[in-house]
Structure formats: C-alpha cells, structure tokens
Amino acid sequence: MSRRNRQVSSMEDVMSIGSRLWGAALALSLCLPVATHGAEVAKTKAPTPLSAYELYRIYGDKTWTWNTGGGRFFYDGRRFVAWSNDKGKPSFAEGRWVVDDLGQLCMRATWTNAEGAARASTCFGHRKIGNTIYQRRQPNGEWYVFRHASVRQGDEFQKLVPTDTVSAKASEVKQILLSQEVARKGG
C-alpha cells in the first residue's frame, strides 16, 4: 500500500471515529434531559400517609383551637368534645375520634345547638414528605402544610395545645342549651 493510500485510510478512520463520536455525543445530548428528569423524579419523594400511631401521638390529649371554639381529643376512650360559637350560634359536640393507617383522623360526634342535634363526621387526611406534614379536609379539601419540618409560626400544628380549654366551655354551652330546651317545652 502506498504512503498516499495509508494516509487516506488513516484519515477515513479518523473521520469515521470522529463521526461516531459526534453521533454518540448527539445521542447522549438527546437522552441526557430524559435521564436528568428521571433523576429529579427519583429525588422527589412521594407523599406517604401518616400511621394511626403518628396521628394518635399528634392529637392525643390535645386541644385543637379554632377561631370559633375548639375540640379536645382525649386518650381515654378516644372521647371527643368540642364547642363552637359560629355567628353567635353556640353549639357543642360529644363523640369519638378515630385514626387509621391511611393518614385519616375523623371526629364522629353529635353536635347540638338551639335548633336540635345531629350526628356529623368530619375527617382530615394527613400525608408527609420527609418531615413536613400536609393536611386537608376530606374528601375534597386542598392540601396545605400542617407542620413544616421545622415548625413555623402559623403552622396549623401549633393550634394543638396540651391544655384542655374545651371541656368546661362545652359543658357550659350544653347546660345553657339544655335549659333553653326545658324552658321551650314548658318545664
């Protein structure tokens, strides 16, 4: 093989290698965004429901204070007691609270006001991503941060307090409503 033919052959090899490298680089650049997107998805943790035990520890023997009243979650018998004075209409509730391993807390109680009594079940879902807990009213409420990983001012979680600020007020509202009913019935 002549020197000229060897040079041409070497140049063709170099060009062939260059073409293959360029093709590989192009293929890699096309795949790379997909691969990095997959890595981002893998980094983002899926929300997981809180266990019944976790919910029991969060709510047990705590009072959830509301703008118009509050609810008390007793450990003993999982009793739930609440009162509210929404729009000048006092009411109280007595019932139970239940939790499950699907991240759900339900307050099942009979609410009584001046018009009468009715059973109600109000449930909240709880999910966590890392140490941040999200909550929503079931079934269709919007998810919001219930407790940041480092608790912040304004977290709903901070409205759960150990002091029972509910029982005495609920009992007072109950006595007032019962006496009003007795008076209406002429007793």
Image (spheres, rainbow, N blue to C red):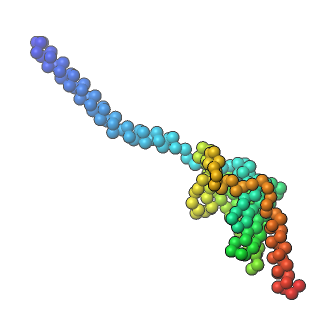
Counting labels gives 0
Name the residue rendered at 76%, 67% in the picture: 83
Counting from the top left corner in percent of width and height, residue 163 is at 79, 55
Name the residue rendered at 34%, 34% in the picture: 28
Residue 52 seen by the camera:
no
Counting from the top left corner in percent of width and height, residue 149 is at 62, 45
> Which quadrant does the C terminus fall into?
bottom right
Residue 151 seen by the camera:
yes
Quadrant hosting residue 112: bottom right
> Which quadrant does the N terminus fall into?
top left
User: Front-most of 117 and 6?
Assistant: 117
User: Front-most of 112 and 14?
Assistant: 112
Q: With respect to residue 71, does 21 lie above or below?
A: above
Q: With respect to residue 136, does 178 lie above or below?
A: below
- Looking at this view, name the residue that lies furthest to the bottom: 186
Q: With respect to residue 34, does 145 lie above or below?
A: below
Quadrant hosting residue 38: top left
Quadrant hosting residue 109: bottom right
Name the residue rendered at 33%, 39% in the picture: 30
Counting from the top left corner in percent of width and height, residue 14 is at 21, 22
Name the residue rendered at 82%, 57% in the picture: 77
Counting from the top left corner in percent of width and height, residue 136 is at 61, 58
- Looking at this view, name the residue that lies furthest to the top: 2
- Looking at this view, name the residue that lies furthest to the front: 153
